[in-house]
Image (cartoon, rainbow, N blue to C red):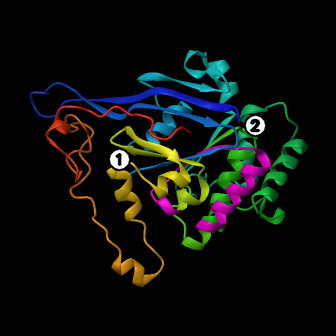
């Protein structure tokens, strides 16, 4: 498979003003601090980690929704950072996003038809009204929405149906890259399974590449080909789905996988599990050396002074 997306040493830092009367020196929040990876055509990369680790900021940096401090993003062999606004606009139609909150991401004053057709009006303004309507109806059918729902408003739908509308809006332009920012975390478990199955079917039909962000590692395991684990803005481990869940190399990854609930109550009650101690450190003042050392059961004195360098253990 060819590489669709290449991210090289991406950094997204935010400069925060000082607080108090004396206004001390501004602080730098390193939300994303040097992430690199490749995404192949038709592949899904799951991105996991605790809240505040930089998953969503990474996605928004790739899409250009927040300013990149350093690093490069290539889409289909083109470096996006060097494009002017007009050229970048033509690439934006190939990169779409599905948001976490299905209802909040939809304009309550617009009908389903208007919501799904909006990207067509922006990126394909010369498209006629009837042609636009046909595209809307076609994508509605693909995501499991009925034709008679086309003129309804978001508040008339369930959460799962609203997420289907959001997916239809993202895919009506037939993008090559779809970013899913925790798209099922606000849904019931049964509805989550339906949306995951829908995304898998759409990926096969449209040869989509996906970045799938989630907290639930059992969901990530179901949909991803490879998984990247983030901690305090950095990548701590990446591997194929099967290898990562079978043999995690980093103690943080091991702790996340051990925390996955097991449906059998007897096995769940008797399993050996050592939860992570302490809270996630502030990205404004991360620990010296290895950022995970304050919570790591294997930490030694050297961890306070040396940050580990990523190394390949098993070739991809």
What is the residue that sits farthest to the bottom in this orientation? Answer: 266
Q: Please indicate whether residue 56 sits to the left or right of residue 121 in the image.
A: left
Q: Which residues are magenta?
A: 192-218
As helix, strand or loop, the secondary structure at mark 2 comes to helix
In what quadrant of the picture does the C terminus appear? Answer: top right
Q: Please indicate whether residue 275 sits to the left or right of residue 92 in the image.
A: left
Label 2 sits on residue: 121
Q: Which mark is residue 52?
A: 1
Mainly helix, strand or loop, the magenta region?
helix
Residue that appears at 40% across and 84% down = 266
Residue that appears at 84% across and 52% down = 138
How far apart are the two marked residues, 2 and 1, measured between alpha carbons? 35 Å
What is the residue that sits farthest to the right in this orientation? Answer: 130
In this view of the protein, which residue sits in the foreground, 66 or 276? 276
As helix, strand or loop, the secondary structure at mark 1 comes to loop
Q: In the image, is residue 266 above or below residue 34?
A: below
């Amino acid at each position: 498979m060819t590489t669709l997306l290449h991210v090289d040493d991406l950094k997204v830092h935010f400069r925060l003003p000082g607080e108090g009367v004396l206004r001390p020196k501004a602080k730098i929040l390193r939300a994303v601090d040097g992430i690199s990876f490749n995404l192949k055509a038709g592949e899904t990369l799951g991105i996991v980690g605790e809240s505040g680790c930089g998953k969503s900021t990474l996605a928004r940096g790739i899409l250009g929704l927040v300013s990149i401090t350093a690093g490069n993003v290539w889409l289909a062999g083109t470096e996006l950072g060097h494009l002017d606004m007009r050229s970048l606009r033509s690439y934006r139609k190939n990169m779409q996003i599905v948001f976490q909150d299905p209802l909040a991401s939809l304009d309550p004053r617009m009908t389903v038809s208007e919501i799904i057709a909006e990207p067509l009006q922006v990126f394909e303004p010369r498209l006629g009204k009837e042609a636009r309507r046909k595209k809307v109806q076609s994508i509605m059918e693909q995501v499991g929405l009925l034709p008679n729902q086309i003129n309804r408003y978001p508040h008339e739908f369930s959460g799962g149906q609203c997420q289907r509308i959001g997916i239809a809006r993202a895919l009506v332009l037939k993008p090559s890259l779809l970013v899913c920012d925790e798209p099922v975390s606000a849904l019931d478990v049964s509805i989550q399974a339906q949306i995951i199955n829908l995304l898998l079917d759409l990926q096969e039909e449209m040869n989509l590449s996906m970045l799938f962000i989630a907290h639930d590692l059992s969901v990530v395991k179901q949909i991803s080909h490879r998984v990247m684990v983030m901690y305090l803005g950095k990548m701590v481990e990446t591997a194929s789905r099967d290898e990562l869940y079978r043999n995690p190399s980093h103690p943080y990854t091991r702790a996340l996988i051990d925390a996955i609930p097991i449906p059998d109550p007897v096995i769940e009650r008797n399993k050996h599990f050592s939860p992570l101690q302490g809270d996630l450190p502030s990205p404004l003042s991360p620990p010296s050396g290895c950022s995970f050392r304050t919570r790591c059961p294997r930490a030694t004195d050297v961890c306070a002074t040396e940050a580990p360098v990523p190394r390949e253990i098993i070739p991809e």
